[in-house]
Amino acid sequence: MQDILVFQRASYRTANRRAMDIRELKNQGISLVAVLQQTPLFEQTSIETIKDILREADSVSFGPDQVVMMQGEPGDAMYVVLSGKLRARQSGNLVGE
């Protein structure tokens, strides 16, 4: 099972959207602020800004071999993998994990 944060493009443009319920992930011992601070994209971002970003995120889970996104589809979200692994395939060939 993979747990992934999804930041939808619409979230970037819409103010006062509902806050994400992160209690379940915190109960698993995951500090989402710490996870994001360790990624190159957010390493220079303030804690308060990261908290604001997390309020706009949704938490989703994917099962084994479930497709998260397909090559060629327009990107409308950014994914941060919290647990598990994803595989990248191109024309059916494994190109990353």
Image (cartoon, rainbow, N blue to C red):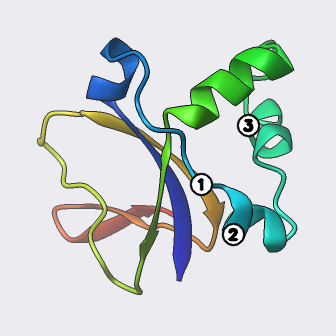
Give the quadrant of residue 89: bottom left
Position of residue 97 relative to residue 69, above or below, is: below
Q: Check residue 36 in the rendering and tell me which mark sits there, or answer none.
A: 3
Label 2 – label 3 distance at C-alpha: 17 Å
* Label 2: element kind: helix
Position of residue 46 relative to residue 22, above or below, is: above
For marks 2 and 3 on the same chain, the one whose residue lies earlier in the sequence: 2
Which residue position holds label 1? Answer: 21
Q: Check residue 52 in the rendering and tell me which mark sits there, or answer none.
A: none
Residues marked 2 and 3 touching at CB (< 8 Å)? no
* Label 3: element kind: helix
Q: Where is residue 4 in the image (x, y as percent from the top left)?
A: 52, 59
Task: Looking at the picture, tell me which residue is in the foreground, 6 or 93.
Answer: 6
Task: Looking at the picture, tell me which residue is in the foreground, 55 or 64.
Answer: 55
Frontmost of labels 3 and 1 is: 1
Residues marked 2 and 1 touching at CB (< 8 Å)? yes
Which residue position holds label 2? Answer: 24
